[in-house]
Amino acid sequence: MNETPNASCTAATMISARVERWLVLALAVLCCAALSPGRAAEAGDASAGGAGPAPAKSVVSPDYIIGPGDTLQVFVWRNPDLSTQVPVRPDGKISTPLVEDMVAVGKTTSVLARDIEQRLQKYVRSPNVNVIVVNAQSAMSQVTVVGAATNPKSLPYREGLRVMDAVLAVGGLTQFAAGNRAKLVREKDGRKQEIHVKLKNLLEKGDLSQNLEMRPGDVLVIPESFF
């Protein structure tokens, strides 16, 4: 039996609709493949108003004091041309686009960020700056163990470092060490502060109250016992 003209038209319409759906699906797959991870990131940056790459992770604690030789990442939100990575010069200053010879030494990253924002207000509306230490090289990025330790030396500071970690890193105490007369020497607000630490109680009795958290620039002094 021959098909009626109406039936033929209906079948042709259905086939055409299926072909159209397949073409749309194929086009969508090709578009997704073309948008590689790198291009997707670029698209994200564009949608964020050209904010540029996100800040790196800091290698120090938030209260770290910047010193000469440190490397800083200065991230200016929505201004990638002003964002840069710079070393802290021996004179204690840094230079970034539009901000020259800014004193960095002796400041925390948050204080330095606010100072840079103040300078940028002349050129940028409501600047938002983030400063991160990506490489700490100054003496303030270390802790030092001196005195009656097996191998007294300076150690790289890391967040969460405690007295026990430092003592183990220098090989423990010598047989002549007066562990309970040890002290942490710390600089705070420009003044020297001494914190007594009973290392013998910590090592031999497990007194964890003596396992104090250390800060960048701390010096652990271990005296010798009197004969």
Image (cartoon, rainbow, N blue to C red):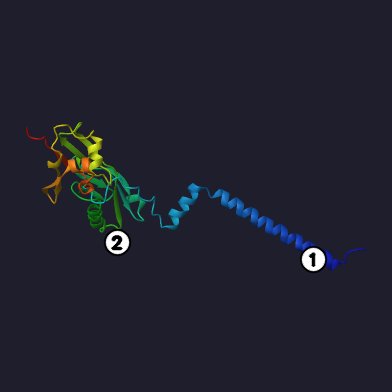
Q: Quadrant of the N terminus?
A: bottom right
Name the residue rendered at 18%, 37% in the picture.
145
Residue 209: x and y, percent? 21, 49
Q: Is residue 1 left or right of residue 127?
A: right
Residue 114: x and y, percent? 24, 56
From the viewer's side, name the closer residue of 131 and 202.
202
Furthest residue toward left: 227
Establish if 176 lies above or below 158.
Answer: above
Q: Quadrant of residue 220?
A: top left
Residue 204 visible here: yes
Furthest residue toward bottom: 6
Q: Amino acid at mark 1?
A: Thr
For residue 10, which numbered disc appears in the image? Answer: 1
From the viewer's side, name the closer residue of 175 and 143.
175
Q: Is residue 151 left or right of residue 74?
A: left
Name the residue rendered at 72%, 59% in the picture.
18
Q: Which comes before the other along the chain, label 1 or label 2? A: 1
Rate crowding at label 2 as few (under 14), some (14 to 19) or many (20 or more) other CA atoms within 10 Å. few
For residue 126, which numbered disc appears in the image? Answer: 2
Name the residue rendered at 24%, 46% in the picture.
95
Furthest residue toward front: 205
Name the residue rendered at 34%, 48% in the picture.
57
Residue 146: x and y, percent? 16, 36
Residue 91 visible here: no
Q: Quadrant of residue 91?
A: top left
Residue 127: x and y, percent? 30, 58
